[in-house]
Image: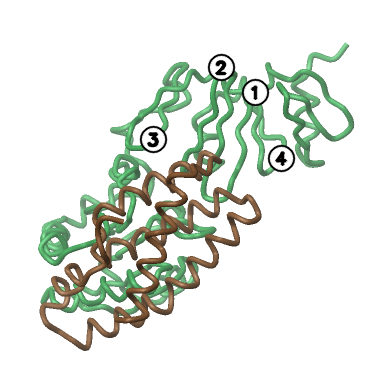
Chain colours: A green, B brown
């Protein structure tokens, strides 16, 4: 199998290359320290398998998968067990290797990849087996924190803030830092209650205290409203 | 610190290939000081989320150097930083791990 390695850490790439060299079924075509370079390569080359790190700055492994139109087989490699559940939401993901990776476990993953039928690979979107239609799935949102799925009552969320590769979910009782994207959580929240007012902020419209110029006071947070989002916000208000 | 950095994982991986062992150690020698510097800079500027990302990266180096117990300290420290908390005990223990790793790779 022709494979590529995508990992921002040189040590991880060195190890994966060694493990791949020791496996007769693999040929390493190229290695990349960032996802953008890898996407360019995929557009011009036939690749059967990708070793993909999840935790990369700016553009993480899951963002990468969602960007590829027809993803080949993917084996994830990470130092974090927390993403295992999310990983198996994607049909193209064959296996999930936790660093430090040893040869025996690596070879097992390759065996799985060899037996993985191409017909099993569909679109690079989360499988519907996990969540049918998140927006219709009631008042609960489950987030993966410290290897636990924690239930959050959606109406108690008043603010979601983008923080790099993470989002901060603020509720009336507690705050949660979750490895996810604004796009993903936006898709899971009811439009009737939530509105994106800035590229880094989604608010619960019911929790607004007041609006002044280009900012919204929500609980104790003052949140900026971007010019492009302001008309939609104003539309949602029951103005006298 | 109870445990010391060692070659157990590197040796297991290399299967006796000394060139590979040296190549991997070279990469660690190059990457680790930069990752430590990033971590310290992010702590200085109270950018705990990024400091957590740095610990995440260093965590892999911890496992490469065979520090199995220290790995858990790094996990706890990373989680704590992502919550915006600098736990004094975890910070100190992590410092000891960084010092031990730095000394080890300089001598290796």
Q: CA distance from mark 3 to mark 2?
A: 19 Å
Above/below status of A238 relative to B36: above
User: Residue visible at 18% across and 79% down?
Assistant: A21
User: Residue visible at 53% across and 27% down?
Assistant: A189
Along the polypeptide, which appears first: circle 3 or circle 2? 3
Q: CA distance from mark 1 to mark 2?
A: 8 Å
Residue A97 seen in the current view: no
Q: Secondary structure at mark 1?
A: strand
User: Residue visible at 24% across and 59% down?
Assistant: B3
Q: Secondary structure at mark 4?
A: strand
Label 3 and label 4 in one chain? yes
Residue B90 seen in the current view: yes
Residue most extreme to the front? B1
Q: Are marks 3 and 2 in contact (CB under 8 Å)?
A: no
Mark 4 crowdedness (10 Å alpha carbons): few <14, some 14-19, many ≥20: some
User: Residue visible at 60% across and 43% down?
Assistant: A162
Above/below status of A13 relative to A126: below
Above/below status of A129 relative to A63: above
Chain ID at mark 4: A
Q: Is residue B87 left or right of residue A225?
A: left
**Pointer 1 residue:** A204
Position in image of residue B46 (x %, y %): 63, 50
Along the polypeptide, which appears first: circle 1 or circle 3? 3
Q: Are marks 1 and 2 in contact (CB under 8 Å)?
A: yes
Q: Secondary structure at mark 2?
A: helix
Chain ID at mark 2: A
């Amino acid at each position: 199998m022709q494979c590529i390695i995508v990992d921002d850490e040189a040590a991880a790439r060195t190890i994966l290359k060694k493990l791949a060299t020791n496996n007769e079924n693999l040929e390493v075509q190229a290695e990349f320290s960032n996802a953008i370079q890898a996407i360019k390569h995929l557009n011009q080359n036939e690749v059967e398998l990708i070793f993909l790190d999840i935790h990369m700055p700016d553009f993480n492994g899951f963002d990468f998968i969602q960007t590829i139109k027809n993803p080949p087989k993917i084996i994830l490699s990470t130092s974090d067990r927390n993403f295992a559940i999310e990983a198996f939401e994607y049909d193209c993901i064959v296996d999930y290797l936790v660093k430090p990776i040893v040869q025996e476990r690596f070879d097992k993953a390759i065996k799985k990849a060899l037996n993985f039928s191409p017909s099993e690979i569909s679109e690079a979107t989360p499988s519907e087996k996990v969540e049918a239609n998140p927006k219709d799935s009631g008042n609960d949102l489950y987030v993966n924190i410290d290897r636990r799925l924690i239930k959050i009552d959606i109406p108690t969320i008043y603010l979601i803030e983008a923080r790099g590769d993470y989002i901060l979910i603020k509720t009336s009782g507690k705050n949660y830092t979750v490895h996810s994207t604004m796009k993903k959580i936006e898709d899971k929240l009811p439009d009737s209650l939530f509105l994106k007012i800035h590229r880094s902020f989604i608010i619960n419209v019911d929790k607004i205290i007041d609006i002044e110029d280009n900012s919204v006071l929500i609980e104790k947070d003052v949140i900026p409203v971007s010019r492009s989002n302001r008309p939609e916000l104003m539309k949602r208000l029951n103005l006298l | 610190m109870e445990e010391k950095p060692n070659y157990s994982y590197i040796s297991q991986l290399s299967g006796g290939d000394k060139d590979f062992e040296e190549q991997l150690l070279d990469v660690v020698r190059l990457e680790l000081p930069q990752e430590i510097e990033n971590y310290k800079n992010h702590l200085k500027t109270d950018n705990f989320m990024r400091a957590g990302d740095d610990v995440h990266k260093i965590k892999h180096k911890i496992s490469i150097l065979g520090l199995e117990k220290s790995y858990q300290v790094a996990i706890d420290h990373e989680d704590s930083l992502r919550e915006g908390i600098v736990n004094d005990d975890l910070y100190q223990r992590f410092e000891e791990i960084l010092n031990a790793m730095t000394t080890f790779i300089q001598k290796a």
